[in-house]
Amino acid sequence: MNLILKTHIWGEAKAADLHKVLLSAKKLLDANFGSLLINDIWVYQNLARGNPITLYERGLGQEYKIELCVTDRLWAKYAYQFSHEYCHVRTNHMVGTQRCKWFEETLCETASIYTLRRMAEVWAEKPPYPNWRDYSSSLFDYADEFIGREVHQLPEGTDFSGWLNGTLPELEKNQYLREHNARIAIKLLDIFEDDPHLWSSMGYFNTWAVDPDDDIHSCLGKLEDVVPKENKSGVKTLAEFLK
């Protein structure tokens, strides 16, 4: 499969440079998911929408369509947005129960900050261009700034498990509660950095017969059922964390 920029003008950014940034993010996620997709990824710029999105509409050849809301040479922001949307593609976003869509959104936020931090490590050693090596710190700083935002922190002394269970009814109705998504994503980051192999399990998400009554606990139980034997312990760890 190929990653193709369908928009050719990205402000001050050269399309060839942007392609290297997005390809760097994609290759890193593909390596963690442990497989490659068959269908191409088409990437568009859509500043008018105001936010990035992975469209449900596919190309005539079943190409995936991702829209980014960035312009000029903001490489870290491109990587952040693309990683989130590409994670949707990798986790079978076109199906699934509404009650678990918040987990998909949260997981894709985790993918963004995880990818930025790994890209920073890769670029410090082998950047797309030799003169981009120093930009590796900007990738890490973008992720670090996201993690450190005050609105992404729970009040001091708040028990995460209690907060999550109290927040689930809201999240099950509206998966786009971004501050909540971010708070959970930051917690999940530790789990995925400790066990990067867990990403390969996420490629099995939504591959079972979907029941609209399934909550996150049911979904993770079904995920454990469908992943290979060597992946089951990681899924159990994730399920325990989200209890």
Image: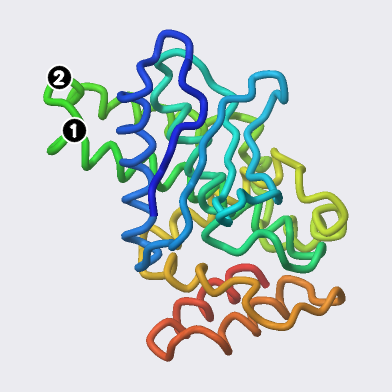
Mark-to-mark CA distance, 2 and 1: 8 Å
Residue 36 in the image, given as x and y percentages of width and height: 38, 63
Colour treatment of the image: rainbow
The numbered disc on residue 21 is: none
Q: Secondary structure at mark 1?
A: loop
Q: Write down the quadrant of residue 70 in the picture.
A: top right
Provide the residue designation for mark 2: 131
Q: Number of callouts in the render?
A: 2
- Kindly tell me whether residue 140 is visible in this rendering: no
Would you say the residues marked 2 and 1 are in contact, meaning their CB atoms lie under 8 Å apart? yes
Q: Amino acid at mark 2?
A: Asn
The residue that mark 1 highlights is: 127
Residue nearest the viewer, comparing 223 with 149: 223
Q: Position of residue 184 (x, y in %)?
A: 62, 52
Q: Residue furthest top?
A: 12
Q: Where does residue 28 sit, x and y in percent of width and height? A: 32, 51
The residue that appears at 76% across and 78% down in the rendered structure is 210
